[in-house]
Image: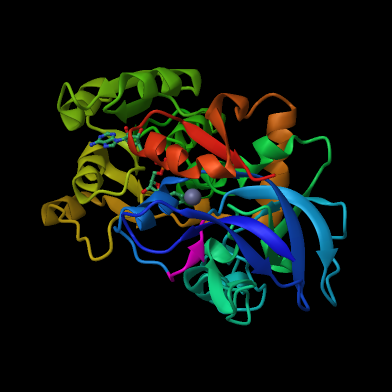
Amino acid sequence: MQVKAAVFYRPHEPLAVQELELEGPRAGEVLVRIAACGVCHSDLHFIDGLVPIASPSVLGHEAAGVVEAVGAGVASVQPGDHVVLSFIPSCGRCQYCVVGRPNLCTIGNRAMSRGTMLDGTPRFAREGRPVYQMGSIGGFASYTVVPEAGCVKIREDMPLDRAALLGCGVMTGVGAVINTARVQAGSDVAVVGCGGVGLNVVQGAALAGAGRIIAIDVLAHKLELARQFGATHTVDASREDPVEAVRRISPGGVDYAFEVIGRPETVRQAFDMARRGGLTVVVGVPPAGAEVSLPAGAFLTEKTITGSAYGGARMPVDVPRLVELYMSGRLKLDELISRVYPLEGINDAFDALRRGEVARSIVTPL
Ligand code: PAD
Ligand code: ZN
């Protein structure tokens, strides 16, 4: 079928909104009509040339929609079902899946980084040439085909535009707190970078019952939003040294520090904010080849640093939980959606994200 999609060709160029050919779902695959797709900074890294991606690619990996058709053997969803899409379609059988770390799935991560289905090929094409799918999704399109393992069915009264945010930013942010760090009630948390993902780290910390939740950003309006999402303290890093400020608010440093920007210098700041024995969690995606330097003496104080990929997502478990939290009024999603763009507005949406104007924008392709 013919679909409309936003295609990345090369860095520092606007995405091209074009008609593409979409092949129907093969065995184990699902055709989805995209209701909404969030605009995440991970997509912007490709456009800004900081992280490489297969070209051409349909970007967009934070999406929800409605199942239109299923390929042979698909059992977990059927036409009409509402689904949130996962950008790491986990196989359920590799060593990572078996030990309960499906976000590290060998096959899913390979498909994600290639921008293909599990068989190594994408379903979009233009003039007979393959067009890849960011995160095995390619959500900036009116329709896409995804692996069955990349679909999580949700209840139908959950608004799909809100549900889209669960596909990356919310899962990543809340998951970094609950799955990766396992933040304990009453403990102190610092969050460096309060954009679409960082605000969800803040609200994850609030959900976990953290004590002090210190939000750090360089934009006053992000800090205001962070307060709405549960921050108890804010630090404007454009006005004062954020490490000193955090150590003043939480003497000795915080129990957990999250970096949610993707820069070596802010990773270092987060590490320096953590107390003796504290945990630093790097959520931000740094530029390809970047290195971080840490004070080696700090290891004697048993400080730990780890990454968090997709918030340690176990999508079939976590997505329905997040849906229930939203439906019962305990997870903020409405407040995350700053702007809604048509597919034709996609480049404006990325410009707004680059300028720090939005918490999250969503694109509604149809
Ligand atoms: P965003 O642009 O919405 O938020 C970044 C925030 O950082 C903005 O509010 C900025 O103002 C703020 N900021 C910039 N510089 C500084 C600074 N020096 N000190 C304090 N604050 C600053 O991006 P996002 O929330 O969509 O994504 C954040 C990162 O998370 C980005 O690197 C993205 O690629 C990564 C990400 N990781 C995963 C994962 O699985 N680990 C998933 C999704 C996104
Ligand atoms: Zn993302």
Q: Confirm whether residue 135 shows in the render.
A: yes
- The residues colored magenta run 54-59
Picture quadrant of residue 214: top left
Is residue 199 left or right of 263 when viewed as pictured?
right
Q: Position of residue 306 (x, y in %)?
A: 35, 56
**58 is within the stretch colored magenta:** yes
- Given residues 279 and 154, the one toward you in this image is 154
Circle count = 0
Q: State how the image is colored.
A: rainbow
Is residue 331 left or right of 194 when viewed as pictured?
right
Q: Is residue 185 above or below residue 70?
A: above
Is residue 358 left or right of 160 when viewed as pictured?
left
Q: Is residue 120 above or below residue 197?
A: below
- Given residues 105 and 208, the one toward you in this image is 105
Q: Position of residue 114 (x, y in %)?
A: 49, 74
**247 is within the stretch colored magenta:** no
